[in-house]
Amino acid sequence: MPTRAEIEAMDRNDPLAPFRDEFTLPPGVIYLNGNSLGPMPTKAATRATEAAAQEWGEGLIRSWNSAGWYTAPRRLGDRLAGLLGADTGEMVVTDATGLNQFKAVAAACALRPDRRVIVMEGSNFPTNNYMVQGLTAFLGQGHEIRFVEKDAIADAIRDDVAVVALTHVHYKTAHILDMDAITTKAHAVGALTVWDLCHSAGAIPVDLNAAKADFAVGCTYKYLNGGPGSPAFIFAARRHHDAMRQPLSGWWSHAAPFAFDRDFQPAEGIARMMTGTQPILSLQVAEAGIDIAARADKHLARAKSRAMGDLFIALLEERCAGHGFRLDSPRDGNERGGHVALAHAQGYPIMKALIEAGVIGDFRAPDTLRFGFSPLYLTYGQVADAVDILAGIMERGIWREDRFQSRDAVT
């Protein structure tokens, strides 16, 4: 177990420490929830003011051209491409993750018209399941979802499968699926893959093209620090661009949007994965966070995040033994994404007490406490401090107090 002096030395020797100065964080807060909503990059506030007051307020409609509004989805997609192992022109930042999931799975199904099975992990973040359930009902062609869990995925990928639609890093447990092996298995039986990278992008290295992934989606407001509700991204491998079609064929995915033709003709390449007019202010603000993630060394970031998670688990098991916590994430950091999940029967009031004490994590029903270890603004010392505060709450039974028992609308 490292001593406090050794932990302080880890922070002094941290090559990623300079990135901390690029974020605005409130004093007295240890923010362990970047896996749900990243904190604000300092430049984001400046960008928001510029985009609203100058580009919109003064430039008005001219800013579609003069401020680069029209090209923003593709520009940000290309900025993300290097981080995620995609090529220029294979990714756009657009719409929400759920909409992109719908589009990607629909496009993949259309490329395999003689098959009807979609393989998914049943314990997915619910939106993934809901969107694909909605898609299969809408298609009305006998499509079905084969829900399985991690250890049964390989056996579920058989020659009747059209699409394997999986989350790379699980939103609750943080277990990592083997993208290379699963994609290889899917291709061997003639299926296509759609990967959800919401808890991967900016947290662990991803190489979509090395894995030969077909499609991928993800959000920008977690480890990419794009801001609440910031637009998501969608990837399509270039080999599918000519044949792929998606059903939400709005004017931004038209070959010539400003020709205002009556009938739809799909754009060339990744642009056909867009839909309608983009949320420009959100896109402009999101660029600040995407830029930070793109500049950081992703392998150093992964090593630090993994080390912070390991430190948290070790300190927790030393300081909080006997208080009813169960580790629900893989103990091996190589098998775990950027957060650690604990289970506790009283997880909700415990998390509320932690947040009041200045340690912000989150809760997922029925009993999961999640702690995210974003490497670009957190310190090892903060990880140790968080465990000390949690231990104090458990030792003194603070979580039992009445004010922590009521549930808020958002948990």
Image (cartoon, grey):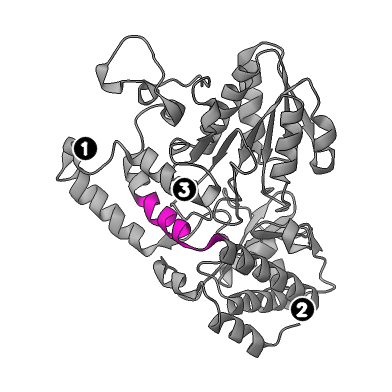
Looking at the figure, which quarter contains the N terminus? bottom right
Q: Which mark is residue 80?
A: 3
Q: Residue at x 66, y 37 (%)?
A: 126
Mark 2 burial class by Cα count in 10 Å: few <14, some 14-19, many 20+: some
Left or right of residue 149, residue 101 in this image: left
What is the x, y in percent for residue 162?
Answer: 70, 22
Q: Give the residue type at disc 1.
A: Asn
Q: Nearest the camera: 239 or 141?
A: 239
Q: Which residue is mark 1?
A: 65
Q: Is residue 348 visible?
A: no
* First along the sequence among labels 3 and 1: 1
Rendering quarter of residue 47? bottom left
Disc 3 marks which amino acid?
Answer: Leu
Residues shaded magenta? 285-298
User: Is 60 on the left or on the right of 74, as rendered?
Assistant: left
Dot in front, 2 or 3: 3
Quick check: is 272 in the magenta stretch? no
Tag 3: Cα neighbours inside 10 Å, few (<14), some, or many (≥20)? many
Is mark 1 in CB contact (under 8 Å) with mark 2? no
For the point 53% across and 38% down, which residue is it? 97
Which percent across, then down, holds residue 134? 62, 23
Q: Main secondary structure of the magenta part?
A: helix
